[in-house]
Amino acid sequence: MRFYGISWARLMAILIKEFRQIRRDRLTFAMMVGVPIMQLVLFGYAINTDPKHLPLAVVGADHSEFSRSFVRALENSQYFNVTALAHDEAQGSRMLDTGQVQFLLVIPPDFARRLVRGERPALLLAADATDPSASGNALAAVANISRQVLNRDLNGPLARLRASEPPFEVRIQRRYNPDGLVRYNIVPGLIGVILTMTMVMMTALAVTRERERGTMENLLATPARPAEVMIGKIVPYILIGYVQVLVILVTAHLLFQVPMVGSLVLLSLALVLFMAANLAVGFTFSTLARNQLQAMQLTFFFFLPSMLLSGFMFPFRGMPRWAQVIGEVLPLTHFLRAVRGILLKGNVLADIAPNLWPIALFMLAAGAVAMLRYRETLD
């Protein structure tokens, strides 16, 4: 049967052939189903632009009912969660520098006495503003809290202190990004995002391309061991990665005026670990993929959760616990903390060490899997 020159028999034969090909290519079919499901789950459940229960360190030299009421009000707002009590402001600032807490509240020792006298004492609330979206809503809520928090405590002779203006002042200090510029957070993060995409993809495609062209046979005929092949494949792309980073840093400084207060040598150390970890992932994908299309699909399957669950696009502390657990496994999560800490906070090696060893561990695990799957002979 024909319709405008089209043979339905031939058309059905081609359709059947394509469906059989899809059925045989199980990896591609799994990606076609898995990627939409993963996007629905991540965007539907893991993404939250209004983070709550953010960690707060308190330096409380004053233990009056007024200071306790203010701290309880902060926690009742659900934006703050007191996770540490610092001995002094220096220790609290250290927690803020290393990312242990998002906020630091400093209550002066004479807070209650000056409040009763009507002198309107000041509290200091310092925020880690490297990611303005993570702290913006919480800081906005503080103004409403301070207006009404002490009304219940100001009774009797102290009722005169009730007014439209609160009887104390909360001085908000946005550290590391006082102007709340989003580019200070995004541009350093782009280093990790771009390296994740390019390092994984280039390595996966390079090895898969050799297999498709048949040149892998020549490589396998050599006495090179799996570790030697993997290192030889990885090192050139590490050099390419450094060129990419140099371009990003120069552009960030000249066009976006992103501050770079930390050590670039320390940043180079973090870059070596991070690039090696992603290249090991790419090498592993090359052992799973049969062709370059599958290598691209596997790269995207790894890149999507890395971008969404690492804290690059959305606040990490705003995600549910299960999403944070997955994010802690990904090397991009730890690299973003390290690079932002180095460039914006001036972190030293001791400050970023908690984020370096997870990247190194991930690199060793991915490298071990890649070497185990590497075949010294063709099937």
Image (cartoon, rainbow, N blue to C red):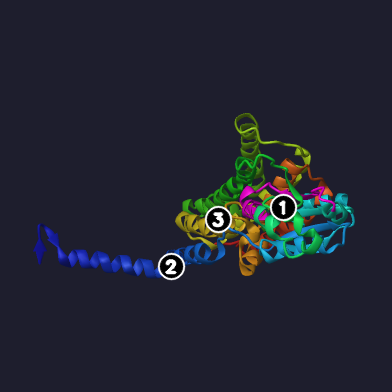
In this rendering, would 28 be left or right of 207? left
Q: Within the magenta stretch, is there residue 140?
A: yes
Q: Can you say whether 81 is above or below 246 in the image?
A: below
* Quadrant of the rendering where the N terminus is positioned: bottom left
> How far across and how far down the image is residue 60, in percent?
85, 58
Taking depth in this image into account, of 245 and 215 the one nearest to the observer is: 245
Distance from disc 1 to disc 2, alpha carbons, whole Å, reads 56 Å
- What is the number of the mark on residue 166? 1
- Compare marks 2 and 3 and give the one earlier in the sequence: 2
* Frontmost residue, 96 versus 330: 96
Q: Residue 34: image x %, image y %? A: 47, 67
CA gap, disc 2 and disc 3: 17 Å
**Where is mark 3, residue-wise?**
303
Q: Report the mark closest to the observer, 1 or 3.
A: 1
Query: Taking 342 as reference, is 115 above or below it?
Result: below
Depth check, front residue: 41 or 181: 181
CA–CA distance between discs 1 and 3? 48 Å
Q: Earlier in the sequence, mark 1 or mark 3?
A: 1
Residue highlighted by disc 2: 33
- Residue 69: quarter of image: bottom right
User: Please, what is the three-letter code of the amino acid marked with disc 2?
Assistant: Val
Viewer can see residue 6: yes
Q: Which residues are magenta?
A: 117-142
Q: Are marks 1 and 3 in contact (CB under 8 Å)?
A: no
- x then y, percent, for residue 33: 43, 67
* Dot 1 and dot 2 residues touching (CB under 8 Å): no
> Which amino acid type is shown beneath numbered disc 1?
Pro
SS for callout 3: helix
Element class at badge 1: loop
Amino acid on which disc 3 is placed: Phe
Residue name at image x 47 percent, y 63 percent: 35
Q: Is residue 22 left or right of residue 345?
A: left
